[in-house]
């Protein structure tokens, strides 16, 4: 089967539709486009790998080839946690075990070899690398496995998985990737806020992911109004975005009526897109009363977004492309910035999260409790 039509769709977008690829040297872009067309006749895996390399050139965390529905993966869910990765093997429950190596190679080395297939920045790569670590074709491509069995090192134990025994990728790696330990959206663990602070969690800003989103935002506002002087913990970990306008009523309430001393905003590599904007708006509105805690978020504060998703019918993959510039670091809109976004854009400056341990024992325990409770 040929994937030439899919290759032509990708080429059209990177050459004429998505502005982020205009920054790529033309000869480099041309080489990867040519490689994509050659791979279109070499089978599905070869085509998808070439597509991943090409679309990663934009160094744009939004624009990427999404292969989850097109690939088959080993029955192993790998997801990022803290400074590394965890894995849940067949028959296991809970929060899995630390993933230490693949095919005898340290997992950090494997991640480095996979970097050319994933977009910048590094935090985004770490958030999206799990499905590639379980995809036999990707592991073979980077030389991480040899033969018919993949060997994974998990907390001092060894897991042997036959390369031929796979499941559809989307079963273990759904969209969006939020860093949950299982493919379904598990409830985030309920944990006590430190020192009597009010704990609020927003796990998504996409009403198609959570139809109850509007009610949850309203409930958070009601909780604020009931205790306007309490310090806050606002948890945005795992929030892959949606529309930041859905969070604006909460942001407005914080700026208007909240009188507490500190709003601790928890973020991680899965905090992305509209969730990053929400963090920026809170930092701008609250000034020194807001502090970011966790790890670098999934994108920079100045990023490409909007755009759309192009279905690639022959391969079953999708190309998520962008066409609008957001700059929440300086607050300067560009000609591509939608007017409704430009009207509320602010300059939040760099948001460099404090490591959890630097925020005090209570916050550090809160941040890590979802792993610590499973002995990770």
Image: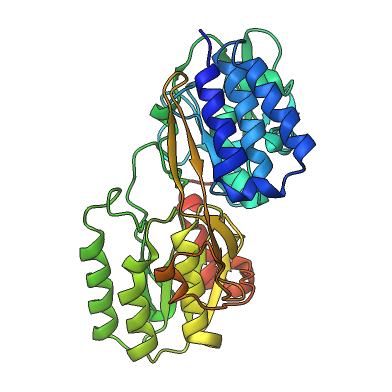
Image quadrant assignment for residue 10: top right
Q: Residue at x 77, y 43 (%)?
A: 25
Residue 281 in sight here:
yes
**Colouring scheme, one of rainbow, by chain, secondary structure, one colour:** rainbow
For the question of whether residue 84 can be seen, the reply is no
State the image coordinates of residue 24 (x, y, percent, origin top left): 73, 44
Q: Is residue 224 above or below residue 296?
A: below
In the picture, measured across the screen, residue 121 lies left or right of residue 307, that is right
Q: Is residue 224 left or right of residue 96?
A: left
Q: Give the residue displayed 56% in from the left and 46% down from the top.
A: 18
- Against 64, residue 334 (above or below) is below
Q: What number of labels is visible?
A: 0
Tell which residue pokes out farthest to the front in this image: 16
Query: In the rendering, at what x and y percent does residue 141 appear?
Result: 69, 20
Q: Is residue 307 above or below residue 348?
A: above
**Along the line of sight, the residue nearer the viewer: 207 or 334:** 334
Residue displayed at 63% across by 7% down: 148
Quadrant assignment, res 268: bottom right
Q: Where does residue 190 sit, x and y in percent of width and height?
A: 34, 60
Q: Residue at x 36, y 64 (%)?
A: 201
Q: Estimate the x, y position of residue 259 in percent, counting from the top left.
A: 38, 92
Query: Taking 272 as reference, is 189 left or right?
Result: left
Task: In this rendered view, identify the residue nearer to me: 124 or 183.
Answer: 124
The relative height of residue 282 versus residue 2 in the rendered view (above or below) is below
């Amino acid at each position: 089967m040929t994937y030439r039509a899919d290759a032509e769709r990708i080429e059209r977008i990177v050459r004429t539709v998505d502005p982020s690829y205009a920054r790529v040297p033309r000869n480099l872009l041309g080489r990867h486009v040519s490689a994509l067309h050659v791979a279109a006749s070499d089978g599905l895996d070869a085509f998808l790998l070439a597509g991943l390399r090409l679309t990663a050139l934009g160094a744009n965390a939004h624009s990427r080839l999404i292969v989850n529905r097109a690939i088959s993966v080993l029955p192993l869910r790998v997801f990022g946690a803290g400074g590394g990765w965890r894995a849940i093997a067949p028959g296991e429950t809970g929060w899995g075990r630390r993933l230490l190596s693949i095919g005898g190679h340290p997992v950090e080395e494997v991640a480095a070899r996979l970097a050319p297939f994933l977009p910048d920045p590094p935090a985004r790569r770490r958030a999206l690398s799990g499905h590639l670590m379980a995809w036999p074709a990707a592991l073979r491509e980077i030389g991480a496995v040899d033969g018919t069995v993949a060997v994974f090192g998990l907390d001092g134990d060894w897991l042997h998985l036959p390369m031929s025994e796979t499941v559809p990728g989307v079963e273990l790696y759904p969209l969006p990737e939020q860093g949950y330990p299982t493919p379904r959206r598990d409830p985030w663990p309920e944990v006590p806020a430190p020192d009597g602070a009010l704990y609020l969690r927003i796990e998504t800003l996409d009403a198609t992911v959570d139809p109850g989103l509007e009610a949850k935002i309203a409930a958070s506002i009601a909780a604020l109004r009931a205790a306007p002087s309490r310090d806050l913990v606002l948890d945005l970990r795992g929030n892959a975005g949606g529309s930041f306008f859905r969070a604006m009523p909460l942001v407005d309430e914080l700026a208007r009526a909240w009188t507490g001393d500190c709003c601790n905003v928890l973020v991680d590599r899965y905090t992305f897109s509209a969730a990053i904007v929400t963090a920026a708006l809170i930092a701008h509105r609250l000034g020194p009363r807001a502090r970011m805690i966790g790890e670098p978020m999934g994108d920079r504060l100045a990023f490409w977004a909007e755009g759309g998703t192009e279905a690639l019918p022959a391969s079953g993959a999708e190309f998520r492309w962008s066409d609008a510039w957001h700059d929440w670091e300086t607050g300067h809109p560009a000609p591509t910035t939608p007017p409704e976004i430009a009207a509320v854009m602010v300059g939040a400056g760099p948001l460099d999260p404090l490591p959890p341990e630097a925020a005090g024992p209570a916050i550090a325990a809160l941040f890590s409790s979802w792993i610590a409770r499973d002995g990770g």
